[in-house]
Image: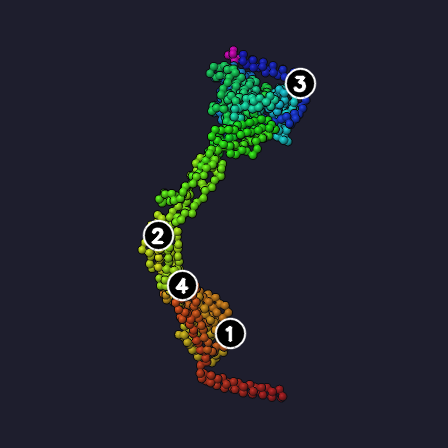
Amino acid sequence: MKKKIKLCILATLSILFVMLASKTYASTSCKNVAEENVKYVNATLTKINREEYNALQRGIHWTDYYELSMSKRYNIDQKSMLMASTEGMCIGGLQNGYIGNNEYWNSTGVLQGLVKNTLVNDNLYVVDNYTNKDTFFPKTNSNTQVYSEVLTNWKFPFIREENGYYSFNSDKYHVYKDYSTKTIKLHEGERNGFYPFNNCQDDTSQMAKRNLGFTVRMDIPFIMTKDGKVKNTQTNEYEDMVFNFSGDDDVWVFVDDKLVLDLGGNHIKLKGNINFAKNEVFYESIYDVNTNKDQKNIYKKAFEDGILSQGKHTLKVFYMERAGGESNLFVNFNLQSGGVQANYIDKDTGKKLDSVSQSGPVGQKVTTEEKQFDGYELVQKPTKEEFTLNEELQIVNYYYSKKSQVNVKYIDELTNNEIAKAETISGKYGDNYETKQKEIEGYKFTKVEGNTKGTMQGKDINVIYYYKHKSKVTVNYIDKDTGEKIDVVNDEVYEGDTYTSQERKYEDYELIQKPDIETVKIKREDITLNYYYHKLKFNLKIEMNLEKALINGNYYGLNGKIGKIETEIRDSNNMSSMQIYYKIKVTNNEERIGSGIITLKIPEGYHLVNQDWQIDKSEAKYQVLDLDIDEVREYEVILEKNKETDISGDFKTYVQIDSQKLPETTLEDNKDMNELVVMPRTGAFIINVIPIAILLIILAIILYYKIKKHNKKEKQ
């Protein structure tokens, strides 16, 4: 208990001392640092409300938290990494420094193992022992109560030193935020620590003026050289590539998302270092949880798999100010983001024979040069060998080759025997070569193995041209009735192949005889195969007969090709109506299906009633489709007399059918004709006219006497 009280008193006195000492510092005026002396890296800064953050992690509001007993606070606080001093340990005590219940932090060293060894989704995660997860370095200020400000993708400044190093020292410089360019700007002049969320005019010598509780993430791309060394631009000597850090509170440094430098925990100002040439990490002081003591000046391996590979990498720094009181930051490194990597490559295999990376400050001139390798010859140099370093990695390749040979053979594919003299083309890697197939009498080229032309690849190249003895298969498709060839297929085939001929279908023919063997083994002799066909016959026949007639609605029966109608005298004039009905019969009387078109000649003074016929002036047409063998189709057509046409007369009606495309065996039955005579009935006129004449005479006499009687009365 005495030990606990003693620690609490010491912590309280320390805070008072800092507060009193801070009054002696005087704020200095702000003086901008020239931009040409500054190198910027991408950064994200977060301002955190410490009480609200702690309440979020504890799961209890801070007003309720402070009403709990000290033991209950302790039980809550041990579950999270909290911001600033926490009451769960002792008043003014240090959080995350406990070893167990009522056992307190006696160390000034860093506390390692607080975060996961690998970034998750490009963010830092606290180990599962604590509740924080990835809340220390949020990417947005979605929770403005906890994260009062999040500056995403800003630029953080480092001073360019004359020796090729870059540094930031909060003892010499202070920073301010330029929102218009999203840049953290540097001001010269001594200030009290590192407070990026303060304004330039704030007197940070007073603790009450300091904006505490924040995080900074910086992404620093760099080029790793082959030996991990880089030239000092003042001495021109090559020095180890290093990253130096000094500061208080948590700092974690990752390379390619793997944790390399672990300066976690709330601690006093401590140093850490990564030496890339020695593959080594240095710690000024580490707290050993097993012995409850600090270990001083500790060296560890930086990368378990050996020195970092040459080329482009990214160093990511995660810095937190969370203990309260004061904040300071010193970073110094000679890592260079600009560099040139010369690769020496076996052009055949793509394997690197060697690689040399040079790195230095932007603007420095760098020259690459060719190298000598046993058994190889340089075949391709880069287009330029002198470079001016910029912020990117510039890569140049030197290509080497071994001697090469191309062997060309000409082989019978069936027997695997050489059928022509082999050839050899000698050269070296990078030489162009081209082979060609030969025309070999009696043989046909079939395929090739290997690249017929290209660039020699540093090893033997085999090119094999394959041939087969060629033969010919002729397949004839013959009209057996005439002996004429309907079709001929000539196929070039090769000895040893199996050939299968195929019957073919032709619209006007039917197959009646195949060759005895359709599948044959090809030898050196030519082969002929014959298919025989019978040409299908086609013929359309048309017949037309008179059926009936309607005159003024009166029915007159007709039958055959010639008809006669005797009408009443009263109907024998152009005012009478007349319709004539015909029956047309179309027959396919041969061996194949076919189509045709019926053409009906319409007599003068008449028109066709049927709506489904196509009428053009004095002709009507009807299409007969796909008439099957021996099929008969019948059609009824009706001709109607026009009003101005006299009903009496002798007229003929013609019809014919024409095949569509197909020739017919005969055309003699493709036409037909009907004749119809219409005349008044003989004697009917006298019998009917006399009574009408007598009636008219009587009416005339009566009318005469009435007129005479009327005239007499008028005179009287």
Magenta extent: 1-5
Q: Which residue occupies 61% across, 24% down?
A: 160
In magenta segment, residue 95: no
Q: Provide the secondary structure element on which disc 1 rests.
A: loop
Horizontal relation, residue 80 to residue 190: left or right:
left
Q: Which residue is mark 4?
A: 594
Q: Nearer the viewer, mark 3 or mark 1?
A: 3
Front residue of 411 and 347: 411
Density class for disc 3 (Cα within 10 Å; few <14, some 14-19, many ≥20) is: some
The amino acid on which the numbered mark 2 sits, given as a three-letter code, is Glu
Q: Is residue 3 above or below residue 304?
A: above
* Mark nearer the N terminus (3 vs 4): 3
Estimate how packed mark 4 is, as few (under 14), some (14 to 19) or many (20 or more) residues with alpha carbons within 10 Å: many
Which badge, 3 or 2, comes first in the chain's sequence? 3
Disc 1 marks which residue?
Answer: 643
Residues at marks 2 and 4 touching, judged by CB atoms closer than 8 Å = no
Q: Amino acid at mark 4?
A: Gly
Which residue is disc 2 drawn over?
Answer: 525
